[in-house]
Image (cartoon, grey):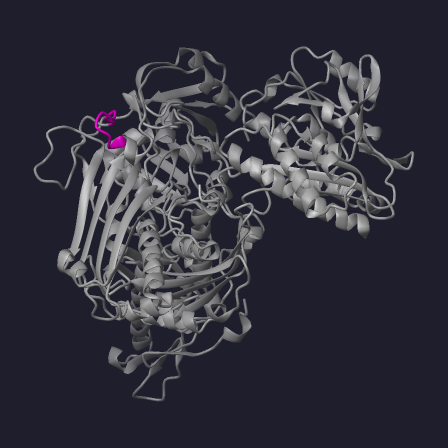
Amino acid sequence: MGNEENVGKIIDYSGRQFKQIGTRVVRPDGVEKVTGKANFGADFKANGMIYARTVRSPHAHAKIKKINVDKALKLKGVKAVVTGADFPEIDVNDKAVGEVVVSYYDMAHNTIARDKVYYDGHVVAAVAATSADIAEQAARLIEVEYEVLKPVMTAEAALKKNAPVLHKHLFTQGVEPKPDKPSNLAARSQFKLGDIEAGFGQADVVVERTYTTQTVHQGYIEPHACVASITADGMVNVWCSSQGQFMVRAYVAKICGIEISKVKVTPAEIGGGFGGKTVIYLEPLAVALAKKAGRPVKMVMTRDEVLRATGPTSGGSARVKLGAKRDGTIVAGDMELTYEAGAYPGSPVMLGCMTGFAPYDIKNINAVGWDVVVNRPKAAAYRAPGAPVAAFAVESAVDELAEQLGMDPLELRLKNAAVEGTQAPYGVKFGPIGYKETLEAAKNSPQWKAPLGPNQGRGIASGFWFNIGGTSSAEVMVNEDGTVIVATGNPDIGGSRASMALMAAEVLGIPYERIKPLVADTESVPYSMLTGGSRVTFATGKAVIEAAQDAVNDLRRRAAKIWDVDLEQVEWQDGQAVCIESDKHKPLTIANIAAKADKTGGAISGKANINATGAGPGFGTHICDVEVDPETGHVTVLRYTAIQDVGKAIHPSYVEGQLQGGAVQGIGWALNEEYVYSDDGRLLNTGFLDYRIPVASDLPMIDTVLVEVPNPGHPFGVRGVGETPIVPPLAAVANAVSHAIGKRCADLPLSPVRLLSIIDGK
Amino acid sequence: MSFGGNVSEIQFATPQTVKEAVKCLAGAKGRAKVLAGGTDLLVQLRAGMVRPALIVDIKHIPELSAVKREDGGFRVGAAVSGAELGANKAFRKAWPGVLEGLELIGSTQIQGRASLGGNLCNGSPAADSVPGLIAAGATCKIAGPKGTREAKVEDVVAGPGKTTLKPGEFVVSFFLPKRPKHAGDAYLRMIPRTEMDIAVVGAAVSLEFDAKGVCTDARVSLGAVAPKALLVKAAGKALVGSKLDDDALEAMAAACRAACNPIDDKRGTIEYRTKVAGVLAKRAARIALERAQA
């Protein structure tokens, strides 16, 4: 990736010279991962460990009449069986309201069904035995009697007048007056700006269309896995891969009815999450089984279980109407989104309403979202949750508007681009942002100028994501020889260890290689919010910087003590303490000071516990070139460029990797990924053979351009980067295909079968 | 790794001769499955789709892993892997289309295991190597309790997951006939991705021409458009006597579409498969023509 030329390069930022930030150092976890030695979720073993399997509903919607576990318990080697009856009941109103609303009642029931099952693959029981094979046999011996109910598989079916109602306690939120009957319509949300009617009144050109997308899965390669044990006095240990050890601890404690101090969670390496590991599935089952069996219990999902019962993100429809003046000024944007939440409320539809129009300075906006429950697995977060579907619709509409106006789609975006001071539809006024800069970079990219051949098309699309901050902790510990350990509480999902070490190295002024970054368990560092929301390099990075500064202050104090001077006389320069008022003291390196630590007050460290504010929003623009086979409907992606304002790239390779990964997931979403259900609600494509994420040969090199407009909310200018890259690709691909075939493609995925029927006009 | 909760109940045999293998299979108590490369069987076992009482691994029988010249053609052991056959230059020169099908099975790693015999006897209508073998006019040697017999490849599969093999029988080898001058074959498949997928439609064409470039023999076979791979005789006939002009190719494509009897499923629709069968057959015929002229 052209690493060498950037190593050691000094980059200007706000008058600051970086020495190590922005270099492409080797990641600390790299060797273990490329040699296959790193311990992921399924790799942990404990003494006396036994193995558990789940029993899952084959029905999309059914009442559980009876569960008979007698035969399973009689099988030799079986140690424990649990059903919903083994878990404490949780109040239906027990919710945590934070970034997203978390209903513990729903979470508990999603983990293991009680009276009803709500989707194909819903857990009804789990059994632990001395081998995985015996557990599998025992699972088959558990007899579940169901009263099969009619499932509702789509939002459309769920909203029909006489549709079966999933939850008796579900009354539509956000409507006045409160409905008197329960329904599958969980919530309505709305965001408004200006006067939508007046806006369309000023429009010379109006485009309107409805766009649809299907349920898609995050597609992380590592299936969910955990080991749980419990001591005789009730101390729980969980080892698992997740996006947050503290998140797992809180949820396990809640669902199992245990105090937080009695649950310790040790994070494993994580083989992909993309939001799908911000929730738990197996851990409470393993804890309950371990408690009954008195042995550590291991659970590993199969791919079939992952696809049937974890993730996914909502399929949805989006009606978008845009109005513009003849000169291209967009004067009104109207959007109505309907997302399928899955079995329990909580699709990311509100986030779709907030993000869809965010790249544009539109004075009159109306965005309405409907959250609908259906008999599919409960939607989990997926990389910029809710934004890609809304952006698909809006960015397609902008493309269509450009056609109607006879304008270049890039110029139309430039004309309407949000800039610093633009009022966003979701409330804030943007600070310094780099959206326009991404468009300029797109215009200057080699791809934008590359010639196109027959049956080829080019699409451009943009995207926005908020990025968040939140609670993070960090500890910087100086070892006796002057090397340093940086401990944080966030699983390293995208190269964050390297970024944390680089930021600490920059502040401490010592080489990156002398710093060991550590992802600590829940009892070794203070609480941190999970790895998600593109927050870790920003928020936990900010904590690391502050902790490193705290350590620097400690080092200065020790030097002052050694020299017997005032603290103010000691400055920290290039990894050394320097006495500014007297040259009789030779500078002291971190190693010199560390060696004398016990004479100056004991161990040297710094810490920071913060709730990071000032996250900077991220904008991206992607260009996609495709060739369509007009006789088979097969799409080949020829060229792809992902451009994004990343604030400041701490480790450019991992930032580029985020852009490439997001683009690839978005390409999969646009072209071939979708859940395929039978009429009675059974998932038909439960493996990667028929749930088609792109393979390497499906893709060209994903070129990247990093635009760096510093975020003033971070000492080094960092913005979150992980989520924005999945927002533009759906429309970039669809716009490219639409241009290649000369027809607007409004329904995803554009699989060969669907595309050929569009080409043939059927 | 769990084997669907039944691995302890399975007997495993590794016979060294065809005779021993027949004995094992014929003497099985319960369902017996033949294991060649295992690229289908192991997946089915793990998914709990099959629960055999006995697995007979035929890879250790020398005849099953050999590629030999016979009557100017080739005798290919049923368990010869894709990687191995692909390294045989003479075979590649004679039957590039057959290899194209075989080499599309799975990934590089799978190619070290996947075999013609396994691909045929798994009975999938979408098996990639089968249309090429049928178009080639290949036969196979089948061993069983009553001795050995030769059968046309198109007669081995009965329907999805089913073969016409009798209890105790298994496929030992394939015979591909001698190639005359001016002959070529090709196989194309349609998949949504570029690899690691199962054919939505497959089409193989094998052609022979005289010195003047007139087609003297043509065999067209389609996969994934019917319960089993089809030999479409009318499609072949449409090409014989022509120089593969557009009319002849369209007549062949029409015959292909007429022969299709596909289903709607998660991978494709009846309409799609039928149309694309004609498209791919035409494209494969053009490639086969090019190869015959080379």
Left or right of A732, for residue B222 = right
Is A592 drawn above or below residue A267 in the view shown?
below
Q: Which residue is drawn at 70% across and 31% down?
A: B234
**Residue A201: x and y, percent?**
16, 60
Confirm whether the magenta stretch covers residue B288: no
Query: Could you tell me what secondary structure mostly forms the magenta stretch?
Result: loop
Q: Which residue is drawn at 23% across and 42% down?
A: A370
| Residue closest to the far right | B71
Left or right of B154, for residue A201 = left
Q: Could you say which quadrant of the image residue B224 lies in?
A: top right
Is A748 drawn above or below residue B164 in the view shown?
below
**Residue B167: x and y, percent?**
72, 13
**Residue A80: x and y, percent?**
40, 20
Q: Residue at x 34, y 38 (%)?
A: A280
Is residue A534 among the parts visible in the rendering?
no
| Residue closest to the far front | B247
Is A523 drawn above or below residue A306 in the view shown?
below
A264 or A30, which is in the foreground? A30
Residue segment shown in magenta: A158-166
Q: Which residue is drawn at 77% across and 37% down?
A: B218
Q: Could you say which quadrant of the image residue A114 lies in?
A: top left
Is residue A381 among the parts visible in the rendering?
yes
A524 or A76, which is in the foreground? A76
Quarter of the image containing the N terminus of chain A?
Answer: bottom right
Q: Could you say which quadrant of the image residue A720 lies in?
A: bottom left
